[in-house]
Image (cartoon, rainbow, N blue to C red):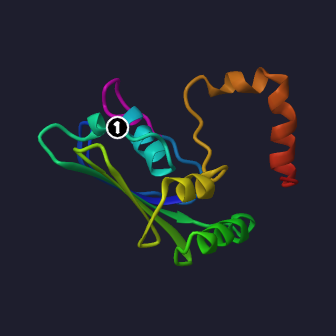
Amino acid sequence: MLKKLSISNFAIIEELSLDLANGFIVITGETGAGKSIIFDAIELLLGGRANHDMIRFGTKSARIEGVFTLGSHQRERIESILEEYGCPIDDDLHIRRILSEKGRSKIFINGAMSSLRALQEISQGFVDVISQHASHQLMQSEEHLALVDMFAKTQ
């Protein structure tokens, strides 16, 4: 679960820090308020494709940081991946991604520089973001078994 999110110089966001409580989280606001940008930042933090156009105009780099609490069902899998990639193991999972104006991206996992591949492996199935119209997926029969497995914790 995402427990803290910090964003600097990303798109139109100069500086944003969110401390998120346990449980159900909803982000609402007026059109153009920046809700989608927050989700773009989370996607990038979890291994999404980086683009130097995401850096706020007039700045040289953007930074996104997240602190995640690991559930017992995730801990073993994630610690195994951290070990495989030589990243330190901590109580929480700290991810930081820095984009430079030259188009390069730096990734840090628990304070150690890491790779996009490691980040993508760790974040696979780690966070569920339910966006507008996502309920349409529920109507697709191929999604039904995956949902049953997820809730039954068989996968």
**Drawn side of residue 72 relative to residue 49, left or right:** right
In the rendered image, is residue 98 in sight?
yes
- The residue closer to the viewer here, 138 or 61, is 61
The image shows residue 88, relative to residue 134, as above or below, that is below
Q: Say which element carries label 1.
A: loop
Instruction: Residue at the far left: name it.
Output: 58
Identify which amino acid the numbered label 1 is placed on. Asn
**Drawn side of residue 144 relative to residue 134, left or right:** right
Q: Residue at x 45, y 51 (%)?
A: 45
The image shows residue 150, relative to residue 53, as above or below, that is below
In the rendered image, is residue 6 in sight?
no
The image shows residue 101, relative to residue 153, as above or below, that is above
In which quarter of the view is residue 142 placed? Answer: top right
- Principal SS element in the magenta part? loop
**Drawn side of residue 102 relative to residue 42, left or right:** left
Q: Is residue 51 magenta?
A: no
Q: Is residue 30 magenta?
A: yes
| Number of disc labels | 1
Circle 1 crowding by C-alpha within 10 Å: few under 14, some 14–19, many from 20: some
Residue 131, percent from left and from top:
55, 31
Q: Residue at x 43, y 35 (%)?
A: 28
Residue 117, percent from left and from top:
55, 54
Residue 119, percent from left and from top:
53, 56
Q: Which residues are magenta?
A: 27-35
In which quarter of the view is residue 13 placed? Answer: top left
Q: Which residue is mark 1?
A: 51
